[in-house]
Amino acid sequence: MKLILLGAPGAGKGTQAEKIVEKFGIPAISTGNILRAAVKAGTELGLKAKAFMDAGQLVSDDIIIGIIQDRVKEDDCKNGFILDGFPRTIPQAQALEDMGVEIDKVLDIEVADEAITKRMSGRRVCANCANSYHIEYKKPAKEGVCDACGGELIQRKDDAPETVQARLVEYHEMTEPLKDFYSKLGKLVIVEGQEEVADTTALVFKALED
Ligand code: ADP
Ligand code: ZN
């Protein structure tokens, strides 16, 4: 099964990707996590990406497409994968088609901008393993500490309110047209992103059954 998760930044793609990983045993490929790992490791890729990411702007298509090209060839992708955060532009989607990757479904998680702004301000991520939490909706057992690895929970620079606004503008302009792209290919399924994570997960699983 090859899936794409679409949706605005903060719509909960990463969280739902984790649920699909657990249920179907296919890996989730998050371009955001790959980039953040590269920034942390100080690689050439990381150096190139950092300024764009901190400003809430997209990293250039050719860099991202190169990452995905390599990643989907890896062994663990044999039985499928979930793309979380890719494609984000029409050229990226076109590149995926050109690679011959046959996507089964594209799930678009819909959340209104106001709800997103609220969610993102409370998001915290583990500085060590990138697990994601929320100060209201997904609290760790111990405040400020990652349940999975004990790492420190921090706010991502790009989750600051001004940057969130910039990311939403970019989402509507660059990424939202992908809905039309995949709808024309008959692959788009809209899922309403509910208040409760579990409710959205139920809708996601339902969408994958049909
Ligand atoms: P979100 O939490 O908003 O879904 P991600 O963690 O997926 O964000 O991505 C964080 C940042 O990484 C983006 O704001 C962008 O700068 C960069 N990025 C991630 N994926 C892509 C992509 N497919 N194309 C361009 N830039 C990307
Ligand atoms: Zn952690």
Image: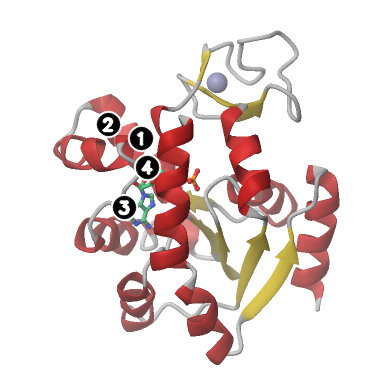
Q: Closer to the observer: label 3 or label 2? A: 3
Under 8 Å from ligand 1: the CB of mark 1?
yes
Q: Closer to the observer: label 3 or label 1? A: 3
Q: Is residue 110 above or below residue 128?
A: below
**Residue drawn at x 20%, y 27% as measured from the top left:** 42
Under 8 Å from ligand 1: the CB of mark 3?
yes
Amino acid on which the number 1 mark rests in the picture: Arg
For the residues marked 4 and 1, what is the alpha-carbon distance in whole angstroms? 6 Å
Name the residue carrying label 3. 58
Report whether residue 87 is seen.
Answer: no
Name the residue carrying label 1. 36
Q: Mark 4 falls on what kind of element?
A: helix
User: For mark 2, does the 10 Å Cα neighbourhood hold few (<14), some (14 to 19), or many (20 or more) residues?
Assistant: some
**Residue drawn at x 31%, y 52% as measured from the top left:** 58
* Marked residue nearer the N-terminal end (3 or 1): 1
Name the residue carrying label 4. 34
**x and y percent of residue 36 in the render?**
36, 35
**Residue drawn at x 68%, y 9% as measured from the top left:** 143
* Marked residue nearer the N-terminal end (3 or 4): 4
Colour pattern of the rendering? secondary structure
Q: Are marks 1 and 2 in contact (CB under 8 Å)?
A: yes
Amino acid on which the number 2 mark rests in the picture: Val
Foreground residue, 198 or 117?
A: 117
Q: Are marks 4 and 1 in contact (CB under 8 Å)?
A: yes
